[in-house]
Image (spheres, rainbow, N blue to C red):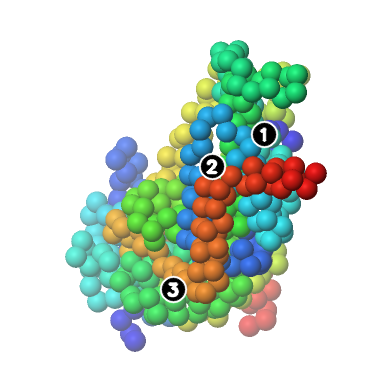
């Protein structure tokens, strides 16, 4: 399946208040690739992610998912293909029980009940929280919420996973488990994050965004060793750099 | 702990109770909703001076609390919490309605007192029944049951969302109030101007969140109609419960059990 590509061509985007958030962003992500999108607060990461499932429409430029461009007619298909996990699981888990939440997507896709049921159980099992299925969403821990949020997307069997800060607010153990979980997925992954340690673990490629432009795009290990670049983009990389050195020694 | 935090934990506790696994908890929510509804209708259908005929109805909540293993004290406290409102509704009855209805030994009882006590009894019964329903079924399941029985979807979905985000909103308010308290030192009361700002802030944050939720819904192929997959099963225990409940409730409503019991006692004496 070579067609699960995500391609952005010269994306430009301005918010209605004239904040110019994206300046000519272009990249191409191939099937099965894991890509980190890194940048300081306000660099345009979240704005970029919202373009990938058509929530925002670029002022100019184009997004292609798979073989077709993102347009009104293809929107539903794109949203099924691109599973989007938001930063705050409380936004993502809007139904009252875990089961209903995970079933929400498949039901909207018009799948028959049996199929929906099977998919919900499978998605919950994949993220390891099957026993929580009848729990009200507001009574989950942050780590559990994050897992369920991922399951809500997995149940639609997407080809591409897009995540905004998946490891924020998790304790070290939950974070570790999340990283292992993400590593086990075969999907293409696009992860916007400040957690550079996680990037080293999961993503072989990193795109650095600064003030709405792509500052660098290349293999993670290479990018994390470029001190000047990192300092320019105002990320605190000292910790990540150390881990990068460590990992390069291992290699 | 502030008052709002207590409310938060109480809500959570009701929720936890619904997780228990007793015969009552396992029943189809629809059956419980219907019997509770019938119970409430019967209780409020008596004339305004009725007291003795209401007393046998206490048998049902007592039975359910026993069968469903609910904490009696907790439910009683919940009822007591709301009771001031009801006290104020009925408090003037004894003053307004002074007509003597019956004599209890040398004590003369006026219609006002009777209707006041009747209001309190009805309040305890109906609120108790509603609390027991929530504690044995859980709010989401009640909403689903209502929908299955024909309540318009827009209504039940609103209720479900309300319940879900009630917790998020309360948590957010608790955090705001905590932050205020920690920096307000000796000033105990929330000043009006500050309260206004806190409230405005909360509203803005809520709007932001609503937008993010909508975004999350759209990215899961939402097209305007919320669909819920929920299969309820109506089995023999449901049939048994519904039939038994209806017969017993109807019997208590239309047969004056208090009078019969009183007569039996008198005859025995």
Q: Secondary structure at mark 3?
A: loop
Is residue B136 visible to the viewer in this orientation of the structure? yes
Residue A56 image position (x, y, % from top left) = 31, 54
Residue that numbered label 1 is attached to: B81
Left or right: residue A102 versus residue A199 is left
- The verdict on a common chain for dots 3 and 2 is no
| Chain for numbered disc 1 | B
Which residue is at a point 24% across and 59% down the rendered structure image?
A61
Q: Secondary structure at mark 2?
A: helix
* Label 1, label 2: how far apart the Cα atoms are: 21 Å
* Label 3, label 2: how far apart the Cα atoms are: 47 Å
Residue A198 image position (x, y, % from top left) = 60, 68
Tell me if residue A18 comes above or below residue A50 in the rendering: above
Is residue A34 visible to the viewer in this orientation of the structure? no
| Chain for numbered disc 2 | B
* Label 3, label 1: how far apart the Cα atoms are: 43 Å
Taking depth in this image into account, of B7 and B62 the one nearest to the observer is: B62
């Amino acid at each position: 399946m070579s067609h699960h590509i995500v391609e952005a061509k010269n994306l430009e985007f301005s918010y209605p208040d004239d904040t110019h958030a994206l300046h000519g962003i272009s990249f191409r992500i191939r099937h099965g690739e894991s890509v980190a999108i890194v940048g300081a607060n306000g660099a345009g990461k979240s704005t970029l992610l919202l373009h990938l499932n058509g929530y925002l429409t670029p002022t100019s430029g184009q997004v292609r998912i798979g073989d077709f461009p993102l347009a009104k007619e293809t929107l539903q298909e794109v949203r099924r293909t691109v599973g989007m996990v938001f930063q705050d699981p409380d936004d993502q888990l809007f139904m009252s029980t875990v089961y209903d939440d995970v079933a929400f997507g498949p039901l909207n896709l018009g799948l028959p009940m049996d199929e929906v049921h099977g998919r919900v159980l499978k998605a919950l099992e994949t993220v390891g929280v099957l026993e929580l299925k009848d729990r009200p969403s507001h009574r989950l821990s942050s780590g559990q919420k994050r897992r369920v949020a991922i399951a809500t997307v997995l149940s639609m069997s997407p080809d591409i996973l897009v995540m905004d800060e998946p490891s924020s607010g998790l304790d070290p153990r939950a974070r570790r488990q999340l990283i292992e979980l993400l590593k086990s997925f075969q999907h293409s992954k696009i992860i916007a994050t400040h957690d550079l340690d996680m990037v080293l673990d999961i993503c072989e490629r990193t795109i650095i965004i600064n003030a709405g432009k792509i500052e660098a795009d290349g293999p993670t290990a290479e990018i994390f060793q470029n001190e000047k670049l990192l300092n320019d983009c105002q990320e605190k990389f000292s910790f990540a750099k150390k881990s990068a050195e460590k990992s390069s020694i291992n290699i | 702990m502030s008052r709002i935090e207590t409310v938060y934990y109480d809500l959570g506790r009701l929720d936890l109770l619904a997780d228990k696994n007793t015969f009552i908890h396992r029943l189809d929510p629809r059956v419980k909703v219907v019997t509770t509804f019938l119970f409430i209708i019967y209780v409020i259908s008596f004339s305004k001076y009725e007291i003795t005929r209401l007393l046998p109805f206490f048998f049902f909540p007592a039975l359910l609390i026993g069968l469903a293993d609910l904490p009696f004290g907790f439910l009683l406290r919940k009822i007591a919490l709301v009771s001031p409102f009801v006290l104020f509704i009925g408090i003037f009855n004894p003053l307004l309605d002074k007509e003597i209805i019956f004599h209890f030994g040398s004590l003369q009882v006026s219609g006002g007192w009777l209707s006041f006590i009747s209001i309190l009894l009805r309040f305890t019964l109906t609120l108790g029944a509603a609390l027991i329903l929530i504690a044995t079924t859980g709010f989401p399941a009640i909403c689903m049951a209502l929908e299955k029985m024909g309540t318009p979807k827009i209504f039940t979905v609103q209720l479900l969302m309300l319940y879900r985000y009630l917790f998020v909103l309360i948590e957010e308010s608790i955090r705001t109030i905590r932050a205020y308290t920690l920096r307000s030192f000796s000033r105990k009361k929330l000043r009006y101007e500050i309260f206004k700002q806190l409230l405005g802030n909360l509203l803005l944050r809520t709007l932001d969140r609503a937008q993010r939720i909508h975004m999350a819904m759209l990215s899961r192929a939402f097209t305007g109609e919320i669909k819920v997959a929920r299969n309820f099963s109506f089995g023999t225990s449901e049939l048994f419960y519904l039939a038994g409940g209806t017969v017993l409730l109807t019997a208590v409503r239309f047969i004056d059990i208090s009078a019969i019991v009183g007569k039996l006692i008198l005859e025995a004496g």
